[in-house]
Image (cartoon, helix red, strand yellow):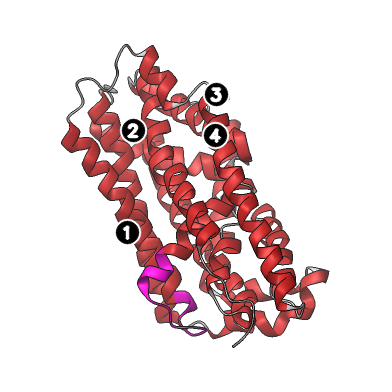
Amino acid sequence: MPKMIRSEATGLLLIVSIAGNAHATVQRTLLLLFRLGIFAWACVYLVAQLRVDESSVLRASLAGGGLFHDVPLSGLLMVAVLMGVNWGFEAFKWRLLVQPLERIPIWKAVAATLAGCSVSLVTPNRTGEFVGRVLYLRPEQRIAGASLTVLGNLSQVLVTLVVGTFGLLLMVLLELPLPVRTGWPLGAVAFVTVLFTLAAAVLFLFPQLLRQLLDLIPFLRRFDRHFRVLSEVPRSALLTTLALSALRYVVFTAQFVALLLLLGADVPIDHAVLAVPVVFLMTTLVPTFMLTELGVRGGVALALLQPLGGAPVVVVAATSLLWSLNVLLPALVGSVLLLFGRSRTTTA
């Protein structure tokens, strides 16, 4: 959790510089350069993943001798539609959280969410997505909006930790094979997981503590008046946010399980339903950055699903396709929206 807070705090520096009192022309120039940089990075990132990462969808498909040849198109379309549902839930969640600051239409919330996805490609564990989102808010509301976005991200982390821990416990009780042997290694994983889960739960359910934690960072202390909004979030909004995060979690879990079944991973569906949340849990706990993300996801998925009967090439292909649909494609769309969209540089 401290690493995530530090990553979010680093991004707040960018928000402060953009939302400052500099001349509007200078701000527009900085925003344009920022947008161009994100768009260029998204393009470079796509090419790098396809050329460098051995777990790319194209490589896995070729290695499998036409892996997607017998996959029903309707099944793949269903998974693609769920991608839209996934990001729709996220847009609704963000719109709900920033509603006290500014009422924005749902189309704008979707655009902001996708723009944030594109920015997140350059931050560890994709923690900096709020930087792209708050550009769609009024300048004077951006720092407060960033803190609320952090709160929304925390709700998703909390759901991932809780469900993943439950899945790990059931796998242990059912004596399913795990990459971590029983004894102290498994105990250490369980201890870290429980510790992170409790920390996420406390910070999310009591956001005033998150405000105090941000105030401990010296260069953010002077923005406490913007973070005050964290202490004013009603409990009903917190519970609704948590529910939307849970629905979103169900969607991308269903996507992964469906891809494993469609591609013929030979993992029993009940085992897959237990193992996939553990995959998400481990990839959340393991630090990732830029080009390492897809490799880490593929490695973790192989470690958990291959002992359950999953063919390596199928597990890698399913992991890569899920990542491409839920992260890479939205990020590319978001980078285009960020490039050609308009952001206000004045309070008028």
Task: From the image, tell me which residue sits under label 1.
Answer: 247
Give the amino acid type for the residue marked by disc 4 in the picture.
Answer: Leu
Q: Distance of mark 3 from mark 1, alpha carbons?
A: 34 Å
User: Which image quadrant for residue 77?
Assistant: top left
Q: Name the residue located 48 percent from the left edge and 47 percent from the top edge.
A: 332
Secondary structure at badge 1 equals helix
User: Which image quadrant for residue 220?
Assistant: bottom right
Q: Nearer the viewer, residue 159 or 337?
A: 337
Q: Distance of mark 3 from mark 2, alpha carbons?
A: 40 Å
Q: Earlier in the sequence, mark 1 or mark 4?
A: 4
Q: Position of residue 38 (x, y in %)?
A: 61, 51
Camera-side mark, 4 or 3: 3
Q: Earlier in the sequence, mark 3 or mark 1?
A: 3
Is residue 62 a member of the stretch shown in magenta?
A: no
Q: Position of residue 9 (x, y in %)?
A: 70, 63
Task: From the image, tell me which residue sits under label 2.
Answer: 174
Image quadrant in which the N terminus is located: bottom right
Secondary structure at badge 3 equals helix
Residues packed near mark 1 inside 10 Å, few (<14), some (14 to 19) or many (20 plus): some
Secondary structure at badge 2 equals loop
Is residue 99 a member of the stretch shown in magenta?
A: yes
Q: Earlier in the sequence, mark 4 or mark 2?
A: 2
Camera-side mark, 1 or 2: 1
Q: Magenta segment range?
A: 97-110
Q: Distance of mark 1 from mark 2, alpha carbons?
A: 26 Å
Q: Earlier in the sequence, mark 3 or mark 2?
A: 3
The disc at residue 186 is 4
Camera-side mark, 3 or 1: 3
Most distant residue in the right direction: 218
Task: From the image, tell me which residue sits under label 3.
Answer: 51
